[in-house]
Amino acid sequence: MIPTATERVGARAIDDIRNDFPAFAASGDARPTAYLDSAATAQRPTAVLDAERDYLEHDLAAVHRGASAATGRSTTRFEEARADLARFVGAADDREIVWAQNATDALNMVALGIADASAGIGGADASRFALQPGDEIVLTEAEHHANLLPWQRVAQRTGARLVPVKVDEQGCWSVDDLVAVLTPRTRVVAFAEISNVTGLIVPVADVVAAVRARAPQALVVLDACQSVPHRPVDFAGYDVDFAAFSGHKMLGPNGIGVLYGRAELLDALPPARTGGSTITRVTFETAEFLPAPQRFEAGTQPVSQAIGLAAAVRYLEGMGMDAVAAHEDAFAERVVEGVAGIPGVRIVGPQAGHARAGLVSVAVDGVHAHDVGQFLDDAGLVVRVGHHCAQPLHRALGLTATTRASAHVYTTAEEADRFVAALGEVRTFFGLGTGAA
Amino acid sequence: MANLDGLYQEIILDHAKARHGDGPLEGADAEHHEYNPTCGDEITLRVKLDGAHERIDAVAWQGDGCSISMASASVLTDLVAGRPVDEALGLAEEFRTMLRSKGEGEPDEDVLGDAIAFHGVSKYVMRIKCAMLSWVALEAAVAKAR
């Protein structure tokens, strides 16, 4: 095994980083549980917990309403958090960052806005989003249900058609595969920058350039859930129209996520939820909405969560996202190479020698993923088993469920090795030979 | 792995590999499909009752899932085929009670037979549905057949 003594993320030693996380505080266990489910929910550093608490103890007050100094301080911190997020993802303007509950909520905001626009809501400004029967929404088969079900709803409401980008036997797809299904009727193209199952990294700028060339009328919607927490991103540079990600996967709080959108689009998209703080003028029958982001932020907002998320962003920036990505790439490489030597265990997604994100899903021949997960749990490894909210992808691969290990800044090479070692024992435990089934 | 051995008793691993009742059933009176959306386990269980609807003449199932759910269906087949319907339903209820016991108590082997091997599952809250899948399908199929 490769020595792990000098493991670092950028300039910082891994042990030092782990000390930032109360969840990894010394438990006295000789072999503490290895948390390998950060792609579902990441642990939080003290800096995030403290930022929320500091706001709640000192500056808690309503935002964007009233005239008190306390409201002013609260609003300032809320908007500073927005600016931190805008810088982190490469937005051209702070107001291109809309707070959402999570990425699922953010993607629904786009889809429902398009459905509303198709029903004539939002007037002439919103007509650019309106879909007609026969229009096409292009999605890959690998999408998380969060980037599939909202589009099913849009299709049901508008008569638009869902068009799949097929995946290959590894669950991967290419720019060419996507270009092949673009037509003059393509109005939406939605895909994940990184698959939460396969770890495939999509060259977003290349995809967008291809869409602009072949289907300039189409909106490009990016699910950035598995990319923003783990690698440098540049939404403006990618030239995507909308993007979505969740706070709790990037060392931040639950209940906060982001919808990114190009300002001119956000200003025209009908808000999916309406209510207080979103409007300019209201009569008994009508309402006029503010520009983005306020037009989307109806009702009392998750302020302490936004401030906590901004603290997570600054924490990650302190390490450098290039360093975070390199650390997680090393995890993936170690797991993929290790698994390659285990008979009867297959990697789903890019194979050894190919670029992939720091999450690795495997299928164990002859053993159901839930049995694999139970075995790994007993071995002190927290992993995710199931369809990972991607049933069409699993069906395309002929699998019911897979077992996924995923990393973040605090994940060690030793944990990767333990995952591989335990996988090597699974088939024997369930009475299958060490040879492939 | 002492804990894990308590869950995966030898009898469960054996039934998961050599599954009793796995297949179609000619002339079934009713069938029921049961699905666990959290893990994708599924089973279609078929029953054939006697003319008076008082005895289960035959039971068979087709499914896909983890070793716990498949072994449970296999043990079910051994236990309920040829049994009075009321007894089989009582057994299903007894099985459910054992799975909800959180590992407490001493289940009655005279009543449960080989199904007692699933007592260890009751300590694993995420797996109780796996063990119950075929039994829930049995209850529903019998209700339809009657």
Image (cartoon, rainbow, N blue to C red):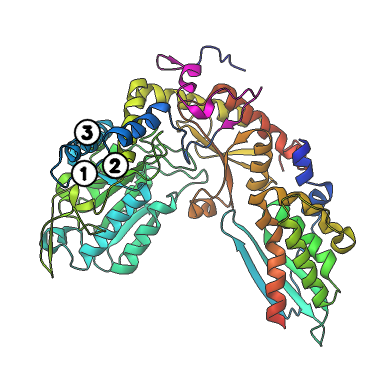
Q: Which residue is mark 2?
A: A303
Say what secondary structure mark 1 lies in. loop
Are the residues flagged by discs 1 and 3 in contact, CB closer than 8 Å?
no
Chain letter of the residue beneath label 1 in the structure image: A
Is label 2 in a helix, a strand or a loop?
A: helix
With respect to residue A247, does A30 lie above or below? above
Residue tagged 1? A63
Label 1 and label 3: CA atoms lie apart by: 12 Å
x%, y% of residue A170? 52, 43
Task: Give the extent of the magenta segment.
Answer: A8-35
One can see residue A332 in this view: no
Neighbour tally class for label 1: few under 14, some 14-19, many 20 plus, Cα within 10 Å: many
- Please provide percent x and percent y for residue A164: 39, 56
The three-letter code of the residue at mark 1 reads Val
At x 57% / y 54%, what residue is drawn? B38
Circles 3 and 2 in contact, beta carbons < 8 Å: no
Look at mark 3 in the image and give the residue it sits on.
A80
- The reply to whether label 1 and label 3 mark residues of one chain is yes
Q: Amino acid at mark 3?
A: Glu
Amino acid under label 2? Val
From this view, report whether residue B91 is shown above or below residue A250: below
Mark 3 or mark 1, which is nearer the start of the sequence? 1
Reply yes or no: does residue A19 show up in magenta. yes
State the image quarter where residue B144 is shown. bottom right
Q: Which residue appears at 51% of the width and 26% of the height?
A: A411
- Would you say A315 lies left or right of A129 here? right
